[in-house]
Amino acid sequence: MKNPEKSSVTIRTIAEMANVSHTTVSRALNGSPLVKPDTRKKIAEIAKEIGYVPNINAKSLVMNRSYMIGIFFTNLDTGTSASFLTEVMQQSQTTLPNSYSLSVNSIDNVMTDQGILMKNFDGILVLSQSPTDDEFIDYIHEMGLPLVVLNRKIGRKDITNYAPNDFVGAKNVVEYAIRMGHTKFGLIKGIKSFESSKQRSEGFFEAINAHDIQIDPNFVKRGDYRPESGNRLMRQILSSGEVPTCVFCENDDMAIGAINACIELGYRVPEDVSFIGYDDMSYSQYMTPPLTTVRKPTSLIIQKGVASLMAILEDGESKKITQQVIDPEIIVRSSVVNRIKE
């Protein structure tokens, strides 16, 4: 292949050599999921061979882009666990084209600090956990910024939205514990204002009530999704005079704290107290015992969200609205003992 002079190399040069459109070349060089992997590879090889070097600064000026994507959580100070934040960021970095950068922000900060300028972002991903985010979502939508809302099902139908079905996940995993012979349950809830906690609690009680199981009020506590609250609240449950045979913690982080409380107080897990978590964080399979939990489809939700945002940015597909609620998966490990054998 004859190489053109480097000074004359442009995207159109690559397009002619690859026999594709210059738009396809631009997308491929940006790592767009809209271009087939084989085509991306071919274009990357040609670009490397002829010495093409993109000028990001010039491209930003010409296209009036910052190449910055804003990821906004409901609140980074409370409620957003470190493990969930890490998983979201890792998956976003993996899925987003290489030319883009990420900026992590808290919705609470934006609504009180006007120093965060929305116009600095090409697009916005909202990891929504509460209906209190609706004001911010409305604000971004009215600005006309490309927007995708993830993690919570929203009421409006004119914004692309991907969310997990936490109600079904909680209901199914508690029904599994009931089939294992458990009838004496404890519950450590998440933050009251969060939709995830609401759905998981409703799923828990749906399964319990369907089997006419009564719950001791002393076994139901409200946490904040952090390990410290799981530990503290489990100590309260154990000091109530009775001990549940199975405790459902509404996320894995609280389950870690609760299990440690049992071990510290001399209870065997799962023989004396079994545990169920939620989210299936990366560490869950390495806990002692490995944690039975619900695998929240966070990676899939992020992949779909980033791909949809890129489609809006690159093709202007803002009118193509996709809304999907994705069922989670039950992950059975050894933290729930089979009491039927007893």
Image: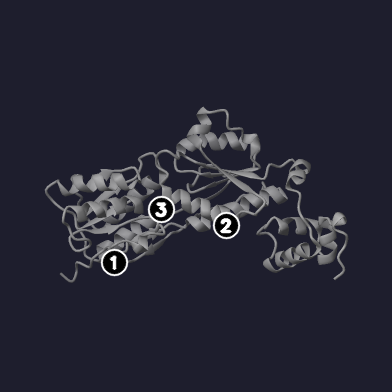
Please give the label number shown on residue 166: 3
Pick whichever, 198 or 308, lies toward us. Answer: 308
Q: Nearer the viewer, mark 3 or mark 2?
A: 2
Q: Position of residue 128 (x, y in %)?
A: 49, 43
Sequence order check, earlier mark of 1 and 2: 2
**What is the distance, in whole Å, between disc 3 and disc 2 at their CAs?**
25 Å
Element under disc 3: helix
Q: Give the residue type at disc 2.
A: Thr
Please indicate whether residue 11 sits to the left or right of residue 196 in the image: right
Between label 1 and label 2, give the one nearer the viewer. Answer: 2
Which element type, helix, strand or loop, lies under badge 2? helix
Q: Residues within 10 Å of mark 3 (few under 14, many from 20)?
A: many
- On the rendered structure, is 53 left or right of 295? right
Which residue in the protein does label 2 denote? 94
Coloring scheme of the render? one colour
Instruction: Tell me the residue that label 1 is attached to.
Output: 334
